[in-house]
Amino acid sequence: QVAIEETGGGSVQPGGSLKLSCLTSGASFRFANTGWYRQTPGNQREMVAVITRDGVTNYADSVKGRFTISRDNTLRTMSLQMNNLRPEDTGVYFCNLGGHDMAVPGRYWGQGTQVTVFS
């Protein structure tokens, strides 16, 4: 049984920082891509950052230079360090696991964690 748990969401003011973490079990981690996706009400889920099993990263243009994705294959964890947060970063952030194409999310999703950036 696959388990994915996201932690680290919260509310911050613009310019603040948050770090999201994703802990996984029950599915192949070492050989799959992992990523963070974001969803806001009325909109489709969008890619924020993806990291391959070899550590190659890809970021949405809106977060480049502010967010950093990382993973630990031994601990089966993934993180997203978010700096200089903006109101438009607000949304529910989902951990994704199991992809093998950076353009296509994997089959496993966490429940999501809320990030709110407010003035």
Image: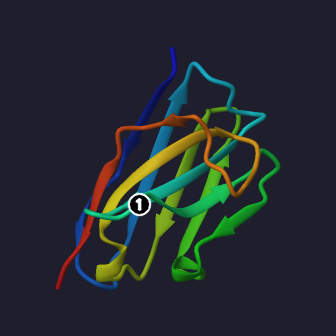
| x 52%, y 78%: residue | 63
The mark total stands at 1
What's the residue at 44%, 58% (across, down)?
45
Q: How is the image coloured?
A: rainbow
The x and y percentages for residue 30 are 74, 33
Q: Can you name the residue that lies furthest to the top here?
A: 1
Q: Position of residue 52 (x, y in %)?
A: 75, 50
Above-or-below relation of 118 to 73: below
Image position, residue 58 (x, y; %): 69, 66
Q: As displayed, is residue 70 above or below residue 119?
A: above
Circle 1: element type: loop
Question: As displayed, is residue 14 above or below residue 20?
Answer: below
Specify whether 105 is left or right of 116: right
Task: From the image, tell me which residue sits under label 1.
Answer: 44
Residue positioned 69% across, 26% down in the render? 28
Locate residue 18, reporting x and y percent: 37, 65
Q: Residue 116 falls in which quadrant of the image?
A: bottom left
Q: Residue furthest left?
A: 119
Q: Quarter of the image for the C terminus: give it.
A: bottom left
Task: Classify 10 Å Cα crowding around label 1: few (below 14), some (14-19), many (20 and above).
Answer: few
Q: Amino acid at mark 1?
A: Gln
Residue drawn 58% across the image and 73% down it = 60
Q: Is residue 87 left or right of residue 80?
A: left
